[in-house]
């Protein structure tokens, strides 16, 4: 009986490990999107990404907006929309700022957004936050600030707040309630952290509005 018990315990453990490995292999959507999007820009800037912005469900992202640093345009930013592993549109990013080379990053080191989404789900479950949609953004706002995913949680189109997940270890850095610039449950005590991310995401909102409508009201 002991032998059988040990066998089934090992089998169950193996199944969990196999499932985890399979999920990791099949969940690299952000890296896949990056590999597609980089074809829209010159080789000299293909590893210089300003931001990654994804829209999807709590479990997976369906579309990615990737802004590359591109000094050939006035804003120094070129956005590429990737859906179903194909480029559907490119345009000059107009986030109300001049994008900086020093704040770019190479997303090839970010193999998957899955762990960040999982961390957001765990935080939401612990704090009883229900949501059905996510807006995920990865952007380096400052060389002196944590490099974080920002996961906005929405329920029926209404924001339920933002969870900031450290990109290097997928731990929760902070939570920002909707329509607030103040962080709570935070492990990052920088007083201006909320203001930095608030201004950054207003710019991204403007990019998305202008992308779809040709007009800009969000950050004006």
Image (tube, rainbow, N blue to C red):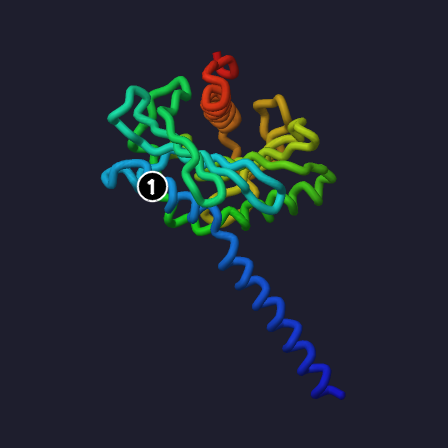
Say which quarter of the image contains residue 78.
top left
Relative placement, left or right, of 162 versus 43 is right
Mark 1, Cα crowd under 10 Å, few <14 / some 14-19 / many 20+, is: many
Relative placement, left or right, of 211 versus 10 is left
Relative placement, left or right, of 14 versus 129 is left
Residue bearing mark 1: 38
Q: Nearer the viewer, residue 193 or 73?
A: 73
Percent from the top left, x then y, of residue 147?
Answer: 44, 39
Residue shown at 65% from the left, 28% from the top: 159
Relative placement, left or right, of 118 versus 63 is right
Question: Height in image: 87 above or below 113?
Answer: above
Disc 1 secondary structure class: helix
Q: The N terminus lies in which quarter of the figure?
A: bottom right
Residue shown at 41% from the left, 21% from the top: 95
Q: Nearer the viewer, residue 140 or 42?
A: 42
Could you tell me if residue 192 is visible in this image?
Answer: no
Percent from the top left, x then y, of residue 99?
Answer: 34, 26
Residue shown at 31% from the left, 38% from the top: 48
Could you tell me if residue 131 is visible in this image?
Answer: yes
Percent from the top left, x then y, of residue 77?
Answer: 34, 27
Q: Count how many numbered circles sit on residues in the image.
A: 1
Percent from the top left, x then y, of residue 110?
Answer: 42, 48
Residue shown at 51% from the left, 37% from the top: 54
Question: Height in image: 58 above or below 90?
Answer: below
Say which quarter of the image contains residue 120.
top right
Question: Height in image: 19 above or below 1?
Answer: above
């Amino acid at each position: 009986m002991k032998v059988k018990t040990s066998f089934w315990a090992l089998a169950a453990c193996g199944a969990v490990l196999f499932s985890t490995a399979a999920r990791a292999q099949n969940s690299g959507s952000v890296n896949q999107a990056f590999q597609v999007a980089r074809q829209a820009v010159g080789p000299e800037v293909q590893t210089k990404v300003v931001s990654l912005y994804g829209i999807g469900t709590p479990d997976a992202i369906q579309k990615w907006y990737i802004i590359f640093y591109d000094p050939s345009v006035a804003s120094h930013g070129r956005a590429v929309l990737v859906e179903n592993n194909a480029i559907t549109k490119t345009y000059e990013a107009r986030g109300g700022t001049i994008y900086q080379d020093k704040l770019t990053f190479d997303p090839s080191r970010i193999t998957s957004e899955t762990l960040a989404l999982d961390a957001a789900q765990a935080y939401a479950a612990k704090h009883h936050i229900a949501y059905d949609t996510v807006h995920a953004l990865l952007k380096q706002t400052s060389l002196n600030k944590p490099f974080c995913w920002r996961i906005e949680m929405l329920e029926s189109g209404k924001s339920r707040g933002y969870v900031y997940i450290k990109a290097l270890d997928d731990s929760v850095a902070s939570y920002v309630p909707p329509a607030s610039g103040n962080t709570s449950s935070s492990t990052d005590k920088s007083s201006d952290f909320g203001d930095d991310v608030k201004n950054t995401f207003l710019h991204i909102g403007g990019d998305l509005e202008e992308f779809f409508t040709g007009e800009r009201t969000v950050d004006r």
